[in-house]
Image (cartoon, helix red, strand yellow):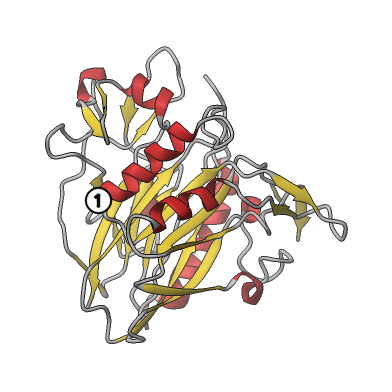
Amino acid sequence: MNKKIYTALIFIFVFIGTGFCDTLKILSFNLNGNYKSHRLEVSELWADDIITIIKQSEADIVLLQEVYIDLIKRSDTSYFKNPKPNNVLDYFIRKLSGYSGTWKYFTSAGYMLRKDITVDGSKYISGNKTQNNAILFNSNKLEGIDQAKMLGFDKFTGRYLFDKNSVQVIEFTDINKNSKFVVINVHLPYNNWENTERDLNTLEKLYALFKLKTGVIIGGDFNTPRQFLTKRNFDNVDGTKNWYYDKNFGLPTTISTTDEESFKFYNDYDHFIFNNKIKEEIVMQRLGIPVDDISFYAIRIGNNQFYNSKDFFDRISDHYPIIFEFSVE
């Protein structure tokens, strides 16, 4: 089995004011950055598949985990590096802006930990160039301000410390200036339950900070089964949870194993969490655990059809994107 660190991309929407007139749609997707062909310099074909998924989903905001970005060393610190320009995120933005509106992005690559560090006796693991997080958004609908410096992420200080320091906090304002909301995007540890619990405790602090006064949505790859989240101080876990699907070709499940002998898709590390100020616009039952590969229905990405999880893994990722559509109370 290939061992790689997954992150749970987690994002929190905080809404202030009268709310949006229209619904918003958010897509969350782990891109499997460790997989060698999932890099722009190796395969524009793969990158174009991701763009096709975003277009077909009609998402307004896209939450990405495990984004491969080459890095540049900094002379002032060994703990952080800068992302090289003209990376895959720039490619995504160019392609999406030619399709719908003008797209922009934020990434954790510039302040993600590149060297392990111990704070108050607790060790925080660093991340490599395959493990960056990013948030893409349609700037014709939204304006965004990165809150990393205000929260101390750029120096790894403050109350909200996570493994890899891949958290993103973006304050968004809708283009009509009616509403503000914050997106918190986190990648939780894989195969390290002690660090996962520590990071979940920190996530609860962020959730509690906003939930009484604003709408809150958390979403992404938690590397944690749902039952461990429902035991915590979150209001709703996976209320509306849509796997990306093509109505003509069926509905697959969320995430595949990296066991090359099975390539089975199963539930469930990708989740959405939200408070009671968020109104669900689409309701769908959660999918169960497939018993065999037949449970992965034939799906279509653009002109390409995938009939089993191995084909999808080889071409796209070992995760499948999830979608949340909502409006504000």
Specify the amino acid type for callout 1: Lys
Residue 215 in percent (x, y) is at: 33, 75
**The image quarter in which residue 314 lies:** top left
Q: In the rendered view of the protein, which quadrant contains the C terminus?
A: bottom left
Farthest residue in the front direction? 98
Residue situated in front as seen by the camera: 37 or 12? 37
**The image quarter in which residue 256 lies:** top left
Residue at the spot x=62%, y=44% of the render? Answer: 69
Farthest residue in the top direction? 261
Residue situated in front as seen by the camera: 88 or 135? 88
- Work out whether residue 292 can be spotted: no
Farthest residue in the right direction? 75
- Work out whether residue 298 can be spotted: yes
Residue situated in front as seen by the camera: 123 or 126? 126
**The image quarter in which residue 326 lies:** bottom left
Residue at the spot x=45%, y=58% of the render? Answer: 136
Residue 194 in percent (x, y) is at: 59, 45
Residue at the spot x=58%, y=41% of the render? Answer: 68
Residue at the spot x=54%, y=52% of the render? Answer: 90
Residue 94 in percent (x, y) is at: 47, 54
Residue identified by numbered label 1: 241
Residue 125 in percent (x, y) is at: 69, 46
Farthest residue in the left direction? 248
Q: Is residue 121 left or right of residue 184?
A: right
Q: Is residue 283 left or right of residue 150?
A: left
* Callout 1: SS: loop
